[in-house]
Image: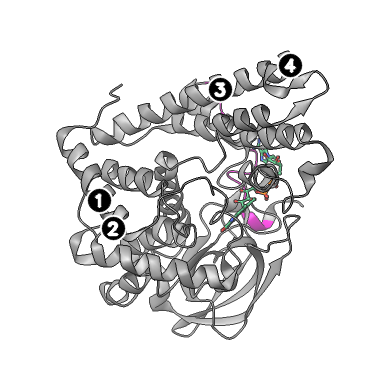
Amino acid sequence: MDFNDTPEEAAFRKEVRAWLDANATRKIDDKASFRARNDDPELLTKAKAWQDKKAKAGYARITWPKEYGGRGGSPILQVIYQQEEANYLVPLGFFDIGLGMCIPTMMAYAAPEHLKRYVKPALHGDEVWCQLFSEPAAGSDVAGIRTKAERDGDGWVINGQKVWTSGAHYSDYGIIITRTDPSVPKHQGLTMFFLSMKAPGVEVRPIKQMSGGANFNEVFFTNVRIPDSQRLGNVGEGWKAALTTLMNERLAVGMPSGGLDVDELMELARDTDLEDGPAIRNQQVRSKIADWYVQQQGLKLTRYRTLTALSKGQTPGPESSIIKIVAAPKMQDMGAFAMELMGPGGIMKEEVPHAAGFQAQWIGGAGFRIAGGTDEILRNIVAERVLGMPADVRVDKDVPFNKLKG
Ligand SMILES: Cc1cc2nc3c(=O)[nH]c(=O)nc-3n(C[C@H](O)[C@H](O)[C@H](O)COP(=O)(O)OP(=O)(O)OC[C@H]3O[C@@H](n4cnc5c(N)ncnc54)[C@H](O)[C@@H]3O)c2cc1C
């Protein structure tokens, strides 16, 4: 494991810091300001402007080839940029799915004229993309989707429903996985396409969350017609295309965890008085904070391991799943503990200092434990691919999809 930047990495970090200093405001103590809710239309406008600025300066997607507006840089340089950007008050989060997952899938499968048309507007934040995979009966088991695409002359007609589609309500385009042949086993009858979210027959219904926001959606498709040229990959090879998308998701591991850190919890414990004095002096409080501190150090070191692999040009392995298995429950537990420490005031985010950030952490933690692989699915990955334990039972793997029960 190597903790230090190479000379090239250090020079890049310095360059990035100088650019960020000149173009953005450093975070001081207002850590919750841009994290809050990404369904605020004003925030999207600001995020689009920031994305455009980054793209013009060559920082929007460092690993992409120069012909697509990237720098042809290594993944570690992308991680360094993100680490530095996390120290500034800039609106993020609207383009991660599009640029991190959808456009890389397009690059692998779309025709050159489509890449010419769609990559640049996505990079500059003019067009937003979403990922239409999960359905009411297919989340962890994406290959179990039922939305169907049927041949119709030169094109296809799509009918069905997706759910939990982050950002569909402000997205312009999406990549969608569909079932094109129900008579073969589930992984074999899938085909991927891209489509306009404004196409006739696409209906987006935001889902109201307990946080008050509505960041993800149900999306219904009723006789949506698309040309065959919008197919990504061969007919029946949608699972392969979906894996391209999901592999790109894994490269997000070097990103900052998104949760508040233990220092902030310590600050709260210093500022909070219990019956027997400041909370920071209470043994039970100290013991909890110590546990999370240890977890935080473990996460940091595991991230360094991943970063070292990236720095050496290697691909991070399935062990990076460990990061989310630990980080997501930690985020939720620390939020709950902090709110309890604040007493009844902990639910009043407008009135009580610290409350907003910890509430966001507690509420957001539940989704973080599910999105991009649930706790259990990630444990399965670690068990099978890291520890070499026997594989999960998959009884439906070879059965034609239309013969499955339920
Ligand atoms: C915040 C958020 C954003 C999301 N954004 C998107 C998006 O943009 N696009 C998109 O397509 N999807 C998105 N999703 C959906 C997400 O990918 C799914 O919710 C996730 O894969 C889990 O699927 P599910 O909800 O259907 O739960 P299920 O798969 O039905 O799981 C239910 C429970 O069973 C457990 N389980 C399932 N299978 C196994 C197994 N083999 N072994 C052990 N336990 C198992 C799970 O761990 C879970 O506890 C998002 C979800 C969230 C929370």
In the rendering, at what x and y percent does residue 160 appear?
A: 66, 70
In the rendering, at what x and y percent does residue 32 appear?
A: 57, 50
Q: Which residue is mark 2?
A: 22
Q: Residues within 10 Å of mark 2 (few under 14, many from 20)?
A: few
User: For the view shown, which residue lies furthest in the left direction?
Assistant: 7
Asked whether the viewer can see residue 392, the reply is no
In what element is the residue under mark 2? helix
Q: Nearer the viewer, residue 119 or 180?
A: 119
Q: How is the image coloured?
A: one colour
Residue 204 in the figure: left or right of residue 14: right
Separation (CA) of disc 2 from disc 4: 45 Å
Asked whether the viewer can see residue 120, the reply is yes
Q: Which residue is mark 4?
A: 284
Q: Which residue is mark 1?
A: 18
Separation (CA) of disc 3 from disc 1: 31 Å
Q: Looking at the image, is mark 2 or mark 4 nearer the viewer?
A: 2
Q: Is residue 393 magenta?
A: yes
Q: Residues within 10 Å of mark 1 (few under 14, many from 20)?
A: few
Question: CB of mark 3 within 8 Å of CB of mark 1?
Answer: no
Separation (CA) of disc 3 from disc 4: 14 Å
Give the mark nearer the N terminus: 3 vs 2: 2
The vertical placement of 255 against 402, above or below, is above
Residue appearing at x 36%, y 64% in the figure: 106
Separation (CA) of disc 1 from disc 2: 6 Å
Q: Which residue is mark 3?
A: 293
In the rendering, at what x and y percent does residue 339 appear?
A: 75, 38
